[in-house]
Image (cartoon, coloured by chain):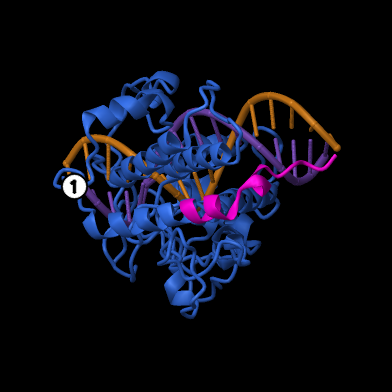
Chain colours: A blue, B orange, C purple
Amino acid sequence: MAAENPFAKLSASDLSAIILKGAQMTTDRDTGFCSGSSETGDELSPMDHSRLEPHSPTDASEDSVEVKVTPITLTRNKRKSTEPSRVICEQETGPLKKRIRYVPGQCKEETDTRNPFRPWDQQMPHEVMPNPAEVLIRHPGVTTLHRTPYDDVESTQDEPLALVAKKPSSSLPAPHNATTSHIGLNEETNNNLSNLQHGDKSMKFQNTASCSSTSLMASMSLRAGTSSSSSSVGSQRPQQRNYKNMTRERRIEANARERTRVHTISAAYDTLRKSIPSYSNTQKLSKLSVLRVACSYILTLSRMAGFDYSADQSSPSVAECMDMVTKTIQTEGKIRKKKDE
DNA sequence: TAGGCCATCTGGTCCT
DNA sequence: AGGACCAGATGGCCTA
């Protein structure tokens, strides 16, 4: 039962029309776009808005209605914590970027194969992209919620940070000393120290062991599998497990799988992002915007093919769909601006 | 500087 | 039992 391709019915004129529409849209917006507060030319009239609202997936009210975000009490400022989230060591060099952004133009040669909808793109959507999970290279200063960065010259950045075997520091630092650097500690010790600072829920991992500084030191030798300086704590300590009796190693493996899974999803978003018309080459639509634009874009194409994929089966005209997708791209483009490169 | 967006870790649940 | 999927929590980056 092969699925019928609805776009197979598109005539050459239809395809050229929508391609031209998209190309014109991108070129027009590229030249005229500025910040939402200052731009005037691209603004739609209220009439246009009222006309298009019923079909627009970008209706802001959708979020407020369907996704009721109840304010969380006792929520502290993400960036203005009263106490430092972690101890910054002077030895930490380089930017503390959490992740390294992938810039296509820096990794591939310039080509002439361009998407008619996104003429600035360096490649066509169908080109095979490397698995982002494999491309991802972590910066030595990468910090995550449950890990603090460390500076180990023996660590290899080719591996996921969580899987890099760490050697214990030759000298044991005082765990509760505010001036103590995390540098040189192994991963689990960093976890513990971070947990202590953040009061994180992941301290469940410590349920089987006391959360004292002694256990922190013990975990250091446990993880490293050595008895260098903390052998006095006990070399026969059982492997730490969480509430599900999951070992630390299995937790790390699960984390890696989860990262791969999320990276796969992100890659799919990137593919979809390349497959839809966008506002300009200086912007990167958010995932939510990508979904919104894609929905309106698909609806437009389906209407051109003679189908009606609208949620309310209102059978909007192709012209209305064109306006809708244009407005969606405009609206979503204003939501987020990427700084000029 | 507040807020949006994202990546990451983690635990819970479901499925094979 | 283990993996996939999901949601919550949290910190970093970026922008208005």
User: How many numbered marks, from 0 up?
Assistant: 1
User: x, y percentage for residue A97?
Assistant: 37, 61
| Mark 1 residue crowding within 10 angstroms, few (<14) / some (14–19) / many (20+) | few
Quadrant in the rendering for residue C9: top left
In the image, taking residue A119 as reference, residue A2 lies left or right, namely right
Query: What is the three-letter code of the residue carrying label 1?
Result: Gly
In the image, is residue A13 part of the stretch drawn in magenta? yes
Q: Residue at x 68, y 48 (%)?
A: A8
User: x, y percentage for residue A260?
Assistant: 62, 53
Range of the magenta residues?
A1-17
Is residue A124 visible in the rendered image? The answer is: yes
Compared with residue A136, is residue A241 higher up or lower down, i.e. above or below? above
- Image quadrant for the C terminus of chain A? bottom left
**Residue under mark 1: which chain is it in?**
A
User: x, y percentage for residue A299?
Assistant: 53, 37
- Farthest residue to the bottom: give it: A109
Q: Nearer the viewer, residue A267 or A148?
A: A267
Q: Nearer the viewer, residue A220 or A329?
A: A329
Q: Nearer the viewer, residue A86 or A308?
A: A308
Q: Residue at x 56, y 73 (%)?
A: A156
Q: Nearer the viewer, residue A164 or A103?
A: A103
- Image quadrant for the N terminus of chain A? top right
Q: Quickly name the residue at label 1.
A: A41
Q: Secondary structure at mark 1?
A: loop
User: x, y percentage for residue A270?
Assistant: 52, 55
Is residue A188 visible in the rendered image? The answer is: no
In the image, is residue A139 part of the stretch drawn in magenta? no
In the image, taking residue A168 as reference, residue A4 lies left or right, namely right
Q: Residue at x 28, y 47 (%)?
A: A84
